[in-house]
Amino acid sequence: MGKVVRIVDRFPYALRGAGRENAQSDHEVCRYERMANATVMKSRAVDRPVEPGNSAMCTHCGAPVKFVARAQLRQVIANVYEGGVWVRVEHFHADCYAEAGAPYGPAS
Ligand SMILES: [Zn+2]
């Protein structure tokens, strides 16, 4: 808990680009840079192969996004942000994402 408070406390330094000097390890520097980049938090979607063990439900059609041997199915995974804040991950069959009108932009 104390650690979290400390990092939040230092967040303003990251925004001013002065976090590096105060970082106590490379890991912390990495955290600062990730936070500094947090100003461009918006929904985005990526296109990925459907892998065995995948059990997500498609946001568009409600059916499971399920692995089928030798079918090489594609899925779209979207990180959904509302008001700059991450709220959830949504999964789509690749075709369903297109059918839904690519609600989170073109999948990369
Ligand atoms: Zn679907």
Image (spheres, helix red, strand yellow):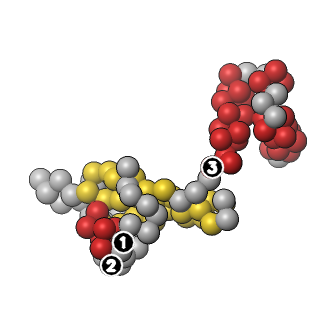
Q: Nearer the viewer, mark 2 or mark 3?
A: 3
What amino acid is labelled 1 in the image? Answer: Gly
Q: Nearer the viewer, mark 2 or mark 1?
A: 1
Residue 91, relative to residue 52: is it above or below?
Answer: below
Residue drawn 82% across the image and 28% down it: 18
What's the CA distance linking mark 2 and mark 1?
Answer: 13 Å
Local SS, label 1:
loop
Taking the image as shown, residue 65 lies to the left or right of residue 25, namely left
N-term-proximal mark, 2 vs 3: 3
What amino acid is labelled 3 in the image? Answer: Val
Residue that carries the numbered disc 1 in the rendered image: 101
x%, y% of residue 68?
Answer: 18, 60
Q: Which corner quadrant of the image does residue 31 belong to?
A: top right
What's the CA distance linking mark 2 and mark 3?
Answer: 30 Å
Residue drawn 66% across the image and 60% down it: 85
Local SS, label 3:
helix
Residue 36, relative to residue 89: is it above or below?
Answer: above
Residue 96, relative to residue 43: is it above or below?
Answer: below
N-term-proximal mark, 2 vs 1: 2
Taking the image as shown, residue 40 lies to the left or right of residue 66, namely right
What amino acid is labelled 2 in the image? Answer: Cys
Determine if the C-beta at disc 2 is less than 8 A from ligand 1.
yes
Residue that carries the numbered disc 2 in the rendered image: 61
x%, y% of residue 89?
Answer: 50, 62
Residue 87 seen by the camera: yes
What's the CA distance linking mark 1 and mark 3?
Answer: 23 Å
Residue drawn 28% across the image and 63% down it: 94
Residue that carries the numbered disc 3 in the rendered image: 40
Q: Which corner quadrant of the image does residue 55 belong to?
A: bottom left
